[in-house]
Image (cartoon, rainbow, N blue to C red):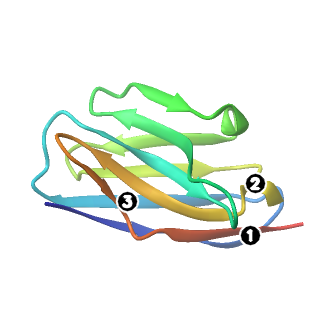
Amino acid sequence: QVQLVESGGGLVQAGGSLRLSCAASGSIFSINTMGWYRQAPGKQRDLVATISSGYITNYADSVKGRFTISRDNAKNTVYLQMSSLKPEDTAVYYCLYRGPSTYWGQGTQVTVSS
C-alpha cells in the first residue's frame, strides 16, 4: 500500500502562482512515476504532468510553459509549481503514484478567480 498526502491548493487570482506538494509513504517501489491529474466539475480527470523516478517529464499541452513538475526522490515527494494561472485551471488536482500498482491522493482544490 502507498499513501499520498497532498497540500498546497487554494484560491488565487488569474496570473498568480501556487505550488502543490504530494508526499508518498508506505511500500514505495524505487522505479515509479508520480504526477498530477485534474478534474473540473462535469469533466473527466485529465493529465496535468508526470515525472518518472528517472526525472523524465510529461506535460499536458495546456500547461506547458506555465507549470513545472519536480520531485525529491529522497523524500518521495512530487511538486507542481503552477504559474500564470488561468480560470480554466480551476479543478480538483489529484496526485498519482504509479509503480507495480497505481494509487491516487484525496485531491486538493485549486480555484483561479478572474
Q: Which mark is residue 85?
A: 2
Distance in Å between CA atoms under marks 1 and 2: 8 Å
Marks 3 & 2, CB-CB < 8 Å contact: no
List x then y, in percent, for residue 79: 44, 51
Q: Quadrant of residue 89?
A: bottom right
What amino acid type should be assigned to the residue bearing mark 3? Answer: Cys
Q: Secondary structure at mark 2?
A: loop
What amino acid type should be assigned to the residue bearing mark 2? Answer: Leu
Marks 1 & 2, CB-CB < 8 Å contact: yes
Label 3: how many residues lie within 10 Å, few (<14), some (14-19) or many (20+)?
many
| Rendered residue at 54%/61% (across/down) | 93
Q: Foreground: 48 or 113?
A: 48
Q: Residue 20, relative to residue 102: is it above or below?
A: below
Q: Foreground: 112 or 43?
A: 43
The residue where tag 1 is placed is: 12
Distance in Å between CA atoms under marks 3 and 2: 19 Å
What amino acid type should be assigned to the residue bearing mark 1? Answer: Val
Q: Which mark is residue 77?
A: none
Visible residue check, residue 99: yes
How many discs appear?
3
The residue where tag 3 is placed is: 22
